Amino acid sequence: MPELPEVEIFRQYFTETSLNQSILEVEINHPKVVRGHEEILKKLAGDQFTGAKRWGKTMFIETGHNHILFMHFGMTGNLNYYHSTVESPKYARVIFSFESGFKLAYVSKRMFGRLGVTKSIADYAKEKSLGKDALEITESEFTDALAGKNKNIKAALLDQQVTAGVGNWIADEILYQSGIYPTTRTRDLNRQQLITTYKKMQEVVKSAIAIDAVREELPAHYITRYGRKTSISCPGCSNTIERTEVGGRGTYACGKCQQIY
Ligand SMILES: [Zn+2]
């Protein structure tokens, strides 16, 4: 599932390919992925995309008019920019055609992604109760939100109302790097451990963006570099990585390097 780093890479890709070109046509191949405003989407014809921002796992595209296009990529979504002489990608649900002869496809195989129009990024964030982006939240905002809560640390990291952008694999990596077992209750962590978690969150997210979210290129001491499987050895102690379920989510951890507090 595209998490913060993947969506940041989509944002960079979009910025490098699709800005400041006249939009000729918007083709909606599958209305299920479009939220509400189909008419407004069609009105994008003649307009231009002027900028792109990201909040958590959602990308926001500014236009020449007073509306903002949002894109959430669900489980399998991505973007594809290509020339109109090339066949559109499979599962292209919405296609923007530009005057330049190029097209941008919003691709969503399983159709869990959503695309639509909002008045402002703040309106969208309020409607979805999004917490601050994981790269924007301050250390004290993060530790204050988690301190004393009767909730396991993995669920707290995944809670988009606390901080937006962290998904399943990043949460596992943050906790591995922090030496904290995922079922630990946040109330059992002291301030220093919460600060460590915050710092590791920054480090993991930035490392993933730096390598274009290609997990195989993550540092050698990261567990997610080796894939989501139990046959791998812990880079720290060589024990086999365990798979458990925490809050219904498949979770990978080292029972030796990560402590339950
Ligand atoms: Zn280990």
Image: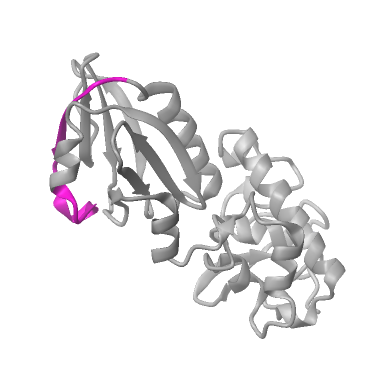
Residue that protrudes farthest toward the front in the picture: 66
* Observer-nearest of 68 and 99: 68
* Observer-nearest of 187 and 239: 187
Residue that protrudes farthest toward the bottom in the picture: 150
Q: Is residue 53 magenta?
A: no
Relative vertical location of residue 24 with respect to residue 230 in this rendering, above or below: above
Residue 75 location (% of width, % of height): 38, 54
Q: Is residue 24 magenta?
A: yes
Residue that protrudes farthest toward the right in the picture: 192
In the rendered image, which quarter is residue 78 located in? top left
Q: Residue at x 70, y 64 (%)?
A: 141
Q: Is residue 198 left or right of residue 228?
A: right
Q: Is residue 245 visible?
A: yes
Q: Which quadrant: the C terminus? A: bottom right
Colouring scheme, one of rainbow, by chain, secondary structure, one colour: one colour
Residue 68 location (% of width, % of height): 33, 43
Residue 163 location (% of width, % of height): 59, 62
Residue range corresponding to the magenta coloring: 21-38
Q: Residue at x 16, y 37 (%)?
A: 43
Q: Is residue 182 visible?
A: no
Q: How many marks?
A: 0
Q: Residue at x 53, y 48 (%)?
A: 4
Q: Residue at x 42, y 44 (%)?
A: 59
* Observer-nearest of 14 and 68: 68
